[in-house]
Image (cartoon, grey):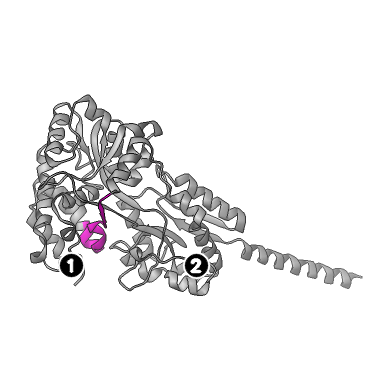
Amino acid sequence: MRIRKRIAAVAALVLMIAAGAGLAEDGVTLRTISCFAGPDGSAEEYVAILKRYESMSGNTVIDNSSIIDETWKTAILKDFAAGNEPDILFFFAAGGDSAPILSRVVSLEEINAAYPDINLQEEDVLREPDGKVYAVPVRGFWEGLFVNTDLFDKYQAPLPKDWASLLEAIRIFRENDIVPIAISLSDVPHYLAEMSVLACATKEEQQARPKTFEEVPASWFEAMGVIRELAEAGTFADNAWRTDDESSTALFVAQKAAMKIDGSWLDSNFPHKMMDSLAVLPMPLKNGEGASSCYVGGVSMGFYLTRRAWDSGHRDAAVELLKELTSEESIWELGSSSLSGRLLDSANDLQTGRQMVSPLQDAMNNRAREKWLLQCIPAVAEGTMTPEECWQRVMALNPFGE
């Protein structure tokens, strides 16, 4: 009898251990990183998608998303360099930022071959130099000149639809203690850099990829000169070289600044009732009539599956999460815009009849891009670096390859 009880106890113990092992295998933990956080208009939807996946799968997702800025990008690249990358990542694609991570993420071709039912679509706009696509896009973007129309009406300033009216508006707002254009030159000078190039360059010049300093288009030098011209006209706040992008955005939302050069994601900062007193305009031409016939836009970000997840024991779980994040329903939730009213109408006008060009910075390698944006632009604006010195320093880093 004792022997039978002992056998039964041992059998029960074996069953308990087996059951415990099964539970451990069924519920895995995945790590994700994205910029769907803070004021992003799709932050809540992103969290809801992760919760939905957890409920369906029994797995746990540890998300480390935060607002997009240089600190966010640098931290991700450092994680990859240290072998501490997440399982799923929402990050930049087909540009200088993605180059350092390509050896540690899985191509869509490889994923589709192993999981044919997932059928991830390869978008040519995100194809990397090796001919492969690694990211699944979710939302497109555009960039433009945002204006607080109430302030323009109040101070009878002309909307900046050409260069003369832009300079006149800057003068009027400066005289009335309103910051003409809110910006952080130390944190996010990207949009000013891109719009200045659009103000001076043709489409072909904007898309040039010079190999040497001598090949740099003359319009690129002129664009850097425009930044200095705007600074000398009092366009930026006195603390523009020290403030951050969050503060400059708050200045614009509080109507203490008349304009802000930014991207479509800025809409997440606007209360719904404010949309009718805002508009976004194309960049005025420095030489010529009216505004540029181009606008900066595209699809620059997408979801990646990392090699770390692919080579782990939780590959299936990671692929299922990628499938959930890139489903038709999820793409609609994450890619939908909160624009309405006058701002929505002007955004449509911005894109209608104009050619879209990708950001110049996206074609640069990471070192050159940081040199141009974070060192040259603030210095050029301050007058401590000439346009020629700027492009000499950038081109010395072979921004577009050998």
Q: Is residue 399 left or right of residue 345?
A: left
Residue found at x 24% / y 58%? 361
Q: Is residue 53 left or right of residue 122?
A: right
Check disc 1 and report its element: helix, strand or loop.
loop
What residue would you read off at disc 1? 398
What residue would you read off at disc 2? 119
Q: Depth check: give the residue in front, 197 or 44.
A: 197
The disc, 2 or 1, on the residue closer to the chain's N-terminal end is 2
Residue 104 at x, y percent in the picture: 39, 69
Total marks drawn?
2
Can you say which quadrant of the picture contains the N terminus?
Answer: bottom right
Q: Is residue 210 left or right of residue 95?
A: left
Residue 358 at x, y percent in the picture: 26, 57
Residue found at x 71% / y 68%? 18
Mark 2, other Cα within 10 Å: few <14 / some 14–19 / many ≥20: few
Q: Depth check: give the residue in front, 348 or 210.
A: 348
Residue 329 at x, y percent in the picture: 51, 53
Residue found at x 10% / y 45%? 228
Check disc 2 and report its element: helix, strand or loop.
loop
Residue 226 at x, y percent in the picture: 11, 47
* Quarter occupied by residue 98: bottom left
Residue found at x 63% / y 63%? 26
* Quarter occupied by residue 365: bottom left
Mark 1, other Cα within 10 Å: few <14 / some 14–19 / many ≥20: some
Q: Depth check: give the residue in front, 257 or 244.
A: 257
* Quarter occupied by residue 345: top left
Q: Is residue 157 left or right of residue 109?
A: left
Start-end of magenta stretch:
353-370
Which three-letter amino acid code belongs to the residue tagged 2?
Asn
Can you say which quadrant of the picture contains the C terminus?
Answer: bottom left
Q: CA distance from mark 2 to mark 1?
A: 37 Å
